[in-house]
């Protein structure tokens, strides 16, 4: 497996792809990056990407990033070891940002995908999830923003960190447990029905 260690070089504006044109992504001053040959052995990649993240969110972010990386390596690059998956990542304005790029033919997001479903997403049944794909569903549940480039070779992900953690500190234990219970019901129902 080829693996390029994380780089912290400041990327000039011309070096970023046209897909990174939203105002939110443009506020990021410094992007770190890493790249690896298409493989499903992602543990060292995920460890490097999660190193600067708050420990409280590691499991959730690991799940979401793993789905994005698997989609790029498996579906984008067809697990071709000659093709590379690249990840640019940064922290700015209370958000963590990731841009995952592959060298595949591109991806077109399904028009009928029920994602994102918001707080009532636990009401979705397994058929609705399978219509757009479990991976897409997970991406929309884990990240606050999920966007694809026009050519479908790049997904842009954002997770708000600072303000969203405040509700955990100030929320009552009952509210916190209710959120966990809803999340568990959503995932366990989808898992059982997909068997």
Image: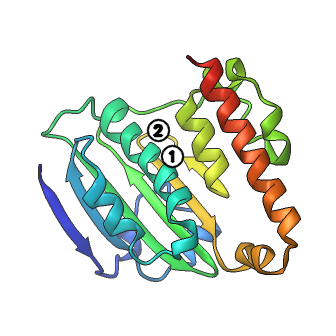
User: In terms of secondary structure, where does tag 2 sit?
Assistant: loop
Q: Is residue 15 above or below residue 126?
A: below
Residue 96 image point, x, y percent: 54, 71
Crowding at dot 2, Cα within 10 Å, few <14 / some 14-19 / many 20+, comes out as some
Residue 46 image point, x, y percent: 35, 59
User: In terms of secondary structure, where does tag 1 sit?
Assistant: loop
Work out whether residue 62 or residue 185 is closer to the camera in this orientation and state it. Answer: 185
Residue at the disc numbered 2: 152
Which mark identifies residue 149? 1
Apparent side of residue 75 relative to residue 58 in the rendered image (left or right): left
Residue 128 image point, x, y percent: 71, 22
Query: Decide: marks 1, 2 in contact (CB < 8 A)?
Result: yes
Apparent side of residue 7 relative to residue 169 in the rendered image (left or right): left
Res 57 → quadrant: bottom right
Which residue lies at the image location 47% right of the left edge and 62% below the top edge?
A: 98
Q: Is residue 129 above or below residue 15?
A: above
Which residue lies at the image location 53% right of the left edge and 36% below the top edge?
A: 135
Work out whether residue 121 or residue 9 is closer to the camera in this orientation and state it. Answer: 121
């Amino acid at each position: 497996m080829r693996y390029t260690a994380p780089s912290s070089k400041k990327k000039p504006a011309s070096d970023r792809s046209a897909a990174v044109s939203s105002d939110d992504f443009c506020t990021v001053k410094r992007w770190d990056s890493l790249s690896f040959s298409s493989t499903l052995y992602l543990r060292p990649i995920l460890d490097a990407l999660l190193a600067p993240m708050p420990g409280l969110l590691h499991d959730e972010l690991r799940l979401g990033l793993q789905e994005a990386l698997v989609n790029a390596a498996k579906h984008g690059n067809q697990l071709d070891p000659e093709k590379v998956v690249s990840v640019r990542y940064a922290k700015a304005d209370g958000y963590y940002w990731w841009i995952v790029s592959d060298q595949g033919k591109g991806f077109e997001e399904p028009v009928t995908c029920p994602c994102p479903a918001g707080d009532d997403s636990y009401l979705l049944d397994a058929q609705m999830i399978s219509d757009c794909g479990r991976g897409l569903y997970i991406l929309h549940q884990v990240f606050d923003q999920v966007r694809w480039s026009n050519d479908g070779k790049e997904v842009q992900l954002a997770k708000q960190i600072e303000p969203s953690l405040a509700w955990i500190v100030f929320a009552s234990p009952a509210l916190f447990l209710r959120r966990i219970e809803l999340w568990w019901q959503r995932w366990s129902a989808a898992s059982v029905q997909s068997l």
